[in-house]
Amino acid sequence: MSKQPERKPEWLKVRFPGGENYSRIDRYHRRQGLNSVCRSAACPNQGECWSKGTATFMILGNNCSRLCRFCNVASGNLTPPDPQEPFKVAKAIAELGLQHAVITSVTRDDLPDGGAVQFVALVTEIRQQAPGCRIELLIPDLQGDWAALEKITTAKPDILGHNIETVPRLYAEVRPGADYQRSLSLLAEARRQSPWLISKSGLMLGMGETEAELIQAMQDLLNHDCQLLTLGQYLAPSKQHYPVQCYVTPERFSAYAQIGQKMGFQHVESGPLVRSSYHAEVQFVASQKDSGG
């Protein structure tokens, strides 16, 4: 593992968050006691997305049962799921007037179904309170519990995502609690259970992967029926986290998007600041156009 590059390039610098919509969503989160992956994971797009009136909600608490070296979400001090959380998040989505809601969660290996029942309750609440809103879920691997996964797919979200995050060679060092093949299998199983479901995954670049390894990971995703792909630059949240190995140029990200499209993905969102939920609605619409839907 090499040393982290000294300086962050210009293309990774983002403007300070602000504006009426940003203040409105920030205020709403604080008043309602809601968790947002935008803040908890230190997403670089928080200012842009909130200023446009979009946000990604994080359920099942603010602490994770795993300790991935790339992630800014805290671990430990796990609390029981809040039974009122699905109602509160759905209410927020309705009151904020979101047309495309993205909901993710911390990983909860301590729960019997990995928190699947909370996702199901949330989808049900959103359908009731905001029936016109498209629902995108970004779920953990559920430890390979396909019965728990079926609870979620039966609830009929519009899009189901699960990120493989990096290439298999780096899993032991970057994602010690995860399993590359299990993550791939989850995507394939979700589509097997619900063939109409749109599946999505993402990788972070600049962690030490080679281009050949990246292309192979992309092919692995396609082989497991993944349709949408996001590629973004990894940014270490602190000096204690796994260090950035290199900064990938915008030109390379554009090239990877073209490669992914030619390989067969319905849509590839690729750029230094791209994250799973970045321009999520745009990704969905683009995928429908690309697939003729």
Image (cartoon, rainbow, N blue to C red):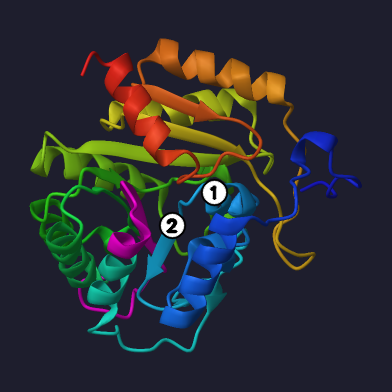
Image side of residue 208 versus residue 38, left or right: right
Magenta-highlighted residues: 93-114
What's the residue type where badge 2 is placed?
A: Thr
**Dot 1, crowdedness within 10 Å: few (<14), some or many (≥20)?**
many
Task: Tell me if I can see residue 176 in this picture.
Answer: no
Disc 2 + disc 1, Cβ < 8 Å: yes
- Name the residue: 17% across, 71% down: 117
Q: Which residue is mark 1?
A: 49
Image side of residue 138 versus residue 196, left or right: right
Closest to the observer, 136 or 15: 15
- Which of the two discs, 2 and 1, labels the residue nearer the N terminus? 1
| Circle number at residue 56 | 2
What's the residue type where badge 1 is placed?
A: Cys
Labels in figure, total: 2
Distance from the alpha carbon under mark 2 to that under mark 1: 9 Å
Check if residue 141 falls in the magenta segment.
Answer: no
x and y percent of residue 36 in the render? Answer: 48, 66
**Dot 2, crowdedness within 10 Å: few (<14), some or many (≥20)?**
many
Dividing the picture into quadrants, the one containing residue 220 is top left
x and y percent of residue 62 in the render? Answer: 47, 77
x and y percent of residue 172 in the render? Answer: 55, 56
- The quarter of the image holding the C terminus is top left
